Image (cartoon, rainbow, N blue to C red):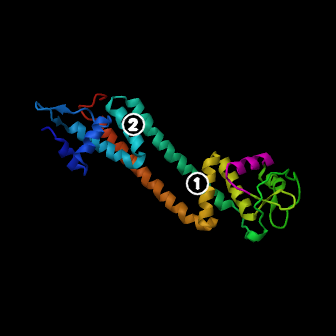
Amino acid sequence: MPLRPIDLARAHGLSTQAVRNYEAAGVLPPAARSAHGYRQYGERHAAALRAFLALLPGHGHPAATAIMRAATAGDLPEALRLVDDGHALLAEDRRTLAAVRTALDHLPSAPADPPASRTSTSGTSAADPPTSGTPASGTHIGPLAHRLGLRPATLREWERAGLVTPRRDARTGYRVYTPAQVRELLLAEQLRRGGHGLARTAEILDRLRTAGSPEAVRPTLAAWQDRLTTRGRALLAGAAALHAYLDHPDHPGR
């Protein structure tokens, strides 16, 4: 028995306009028309709509739409490639979370930062001492780069990328890193070794600053893990619904 747009809409808590929009976007196969020009949907359309709605939580609207367009058009390799992309993004997020946890576990304890009154806001550039000693209020770039096994130029590049912005010594103009910034850079180096880029590393460091301390950020990491688990289950549910759609007897790719 043919299904009307309102039948599909009511079954999934949608408006009839949404159903028509999904058809126009290629998410649903083109509807047949009655003798009077009314849309007539079938079980294949219902399976397509179920697949799309199941893909949404794990992939998001743009990716779910692209997957369904490819699947509805019979381009199975493209549909599966897009599904793989979603799983690859989840795997990358899992690796990032694991790297953050590992880095936090290996960070040394740090004393409190010096009072704000001792911090210069000068942003002028100056030559940094290559191997100068450590001032009482922080660490110069040379010893810090040596500790991290990096070149001073790399730390200046990280500064430009927004990872850590050291203060400037009011007398010499040299960069001075506070104990908290040293810890952040140790974390950044752990993430770099794990293959994470500067943009993602800067985002993680910002989360850490917002939390206030490594220990305070652990509940955030637990919530992050829960979100990844929920997303993983959503990807599985979406894949199952997509498989059912692709396996429908009327699907052109079957």
* Residue hosting label 2: 66
Q: Nearer the viewer, residue 102 or 195?
A: 195
The circle drawn on residue 98 is 1
For label 1, the SS is helix
| x then y, percent, for residue 178 | 76, 63
Bounds of the magenta span?
150-165
Q: What residue is drawn where x is 31% and y is 32%? A: 72
| Any part of residue 21 in sight | yes
Whole-angstrom CA distance, mark 1 to mark 2, is: 30 Å
Q: What residue is drawn where x is 37% and y is 42%? A: 239
**Residue 79 shown left or right of residue 42 in the figure:** right
Q: For label 1, count other residues whose C-alpha is less than 10 Å away and answer few (under 14), some (14-19) or many (20+).
A: some
Q: What residue is drawn where x is 22% and y is 47%? A: 9
Q: Is residue 13 above or below residue 105?
A: above
Question: In which quadrant will I find the N terminus?
Answer: top left
Q: Amino acid at mark 1?
A: Ala
Q: Amino acid at mark 2?
A: Ala
| x then y, percent, for residue 182 | 74, 60
Q: Residue 243 falls in which quadrant of the image?
A: top left
Question: In which quadrant will I find the C terminus?
Answer: top left
**Residue 224 shown left or right of residue 207 in the figure:** left
